[in-house]
Every structure is written in structure tokens, then in C-alpha cells.
Image (spheres, rainbow, N blue to C red):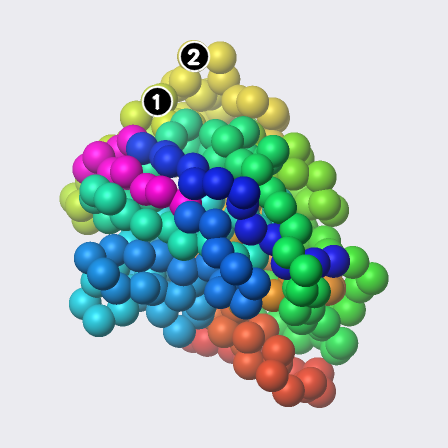
Amino acid sequence: MNQGTIKEKVLFEGIGIHSGEYSRIVLHPEEENTGIRFLRWGVYIPAKPEFVVNTDHSTDLGKEGVFVKTVEHLMAVLYMLGVDNITVEFLEGFEVPILDGSGYYFYKALKDKVVSLSVPAPILEISSSFEVRNSVGYIKALPYEGFSVAYMGSIKGFFEERLVEFRGNIRDVVFARTFCYDYELEHLLKKGLAKGGSLKNALLLGMGFVYNEGGMRSEDEPLRHKLLDLIGDLALVGKRIKGRIVSYKGGHTLNYLFVKVLSSISETSLASSSVSTP
Ligand code: ZN
């Protein structure tokens, strides 16, 4: 499969879910081997693990004191559409617009604009299994012919452990909105997060019920959103992954740890290994 970009500029605008600030971004087509990068205040920030500056409730990138926030939903859609080369320029603000809380509007605007370049996309093949763990869960990598990602978790008040999977059909995950439990809201706001959150851009969950009119878009929507987040974080490796990845209750912080290990093996083929954090 060849590398991809988009055929013309695409603009997105709206508020950021955490900052609550309005932002305007333009996606610019780029030539092969440019990679995905963000541009703000004249600084190009490559979408790579070494530029991750925060993983608390969003994945943020920074370089030389300039940062951009909540890149994961856009990154997930770019990865799933096969867009490897693009510059995301911030004209205003610093957080990627949350839009409806899912990847849907990115997908809708970009799906017919993807063009193939004449150079093959770099592939990262998982040739032996490994895993990363923290106190909450783990993420495993397994050899596999193709790309598949699975997420296992529970939705409090709704159901216990359940598995959702992505095997290449973007429609299985792109609609799923970001979510929050009602009892978490106060804590998030105290931390200065979720200031732009509303029922228009996030699913608000109570114990066994949903505050949003219309309810969930699928009965496992929050788990599918976790899958979207994981794909967005995996995209930071900058290569097409050949392998199967299984997350048990992982979030951005564990995703980031996993991606760092994955990136390190992309340079060298590694024997089976395991990494743990407290
Ligand atoms: Zn998310």
C-alpha cells in the first residue's frame, strides 16, 4: 500500500473539549515522507511519540514551548483513511476542535479527498508478542496478518467486561463519541479540563442511563470510543502497523507507553519482551 495525503486543503473549526476555546485548523496536503505534523506559531511539531507532552484525558504534543492539544481523534481518522503526510496548521487556538466528540466529521470531510502517492507506506511488523502494563490494565501486541485492534473494558452501570474490535471498517469506530461519567465531572472541571464539554460533544453517563437525548449511538459506544482513542495514539508510530493489538482497560497514558515500546522495536526487531510500570 502506498503513502497517502489529501488532494486539497480542508478546514475545521470549533471549540476544544478541554480548553473550551475556539480553534480553527487547516489540513494541508504534503508530499511523501513528510509524515503528519502540527504547525502552530511557526513551530512544526511532528506527530511522534517523542513530542507527546501530556496524556491526561487527551494526547497533547509540544515542541520548543509550543503545544497542541487533543490530537487523537483526528489522528485516528487520518490513520484509518491512510493519510500519512499532512500538516495541520492552527490558525487560531491550540486544541483540535472536538466537533461532535467523535471522528465522524473529520471522516466525512476527508474520506473523498484522500490521494495515493507513488511511494510505499512504511510498515511496522509485530514479529513477536510483547505487552505493557500499569495498575489498571495492559496492552498486548501479537503477530497477525493485517491490522486489528481490540479493546476490552466495562461501562459502569451498563455492563461488565466486553470486547470490541476494529478490523479495518472505519464505520465500526468513527461515530463513537467521547464520554464521561457524571460523578467525574466536578473533578475534571477542578483540574481545568472538560471546560468545553457539553451534551453536544460528549456522552454523559449516569449509573445505567445516559443524559444525552437519543442515548447512545450503539450500546457499546464508549468502548468503541476507547478503540478510536487507541488507534489515534497508535498512529504516532508513523507507520502502518501489521499486527494485532489488544487493550485491557488502557487509556492515553498506557497507550503512550505502548507506542514508545512499539516505536523502539520499529528500528530493531526485538525478541519477546515485557514492560511494566508501577
Ligand atoms: Zn477520545
Q: Which residue is mark 1?
A: 199
Q: Which mark identifies residue 213?
A: 2
Q: Residue at x 39, y 19 (%)?
A: 211
Give x and y (percent) for residue 109: 50, 31
Q: Nearer the viewer, residue 113 or 109?
A: 113
Give x and y (percent) for residue 260: 50, 74
Q: Residue at x 40, y 73 (%)?
A: 50
Q: Residue at x 36, y 34 (%)?
A: 12
Sequence-wise, the earlier of marks 1 and 2 is 1
- Under circle 2, the secondary element is loop
Is 10 included in the stretch rendered in magenta? no
| Residues at discs 1 and 2 in contact (Cβ within 8 Å) | yes
Q: Which residues are magenta?
A: 14-27
Query: Considering the image in quadrants, where does the C terminus appear?
Result: bottom left
Q: Disc 1 beta carbon < 8 A from ligand 1?
A: no
Give x and y (percent) for residue 76: 53, 48
Is 23 included in the stretch rendered in magenta? yes
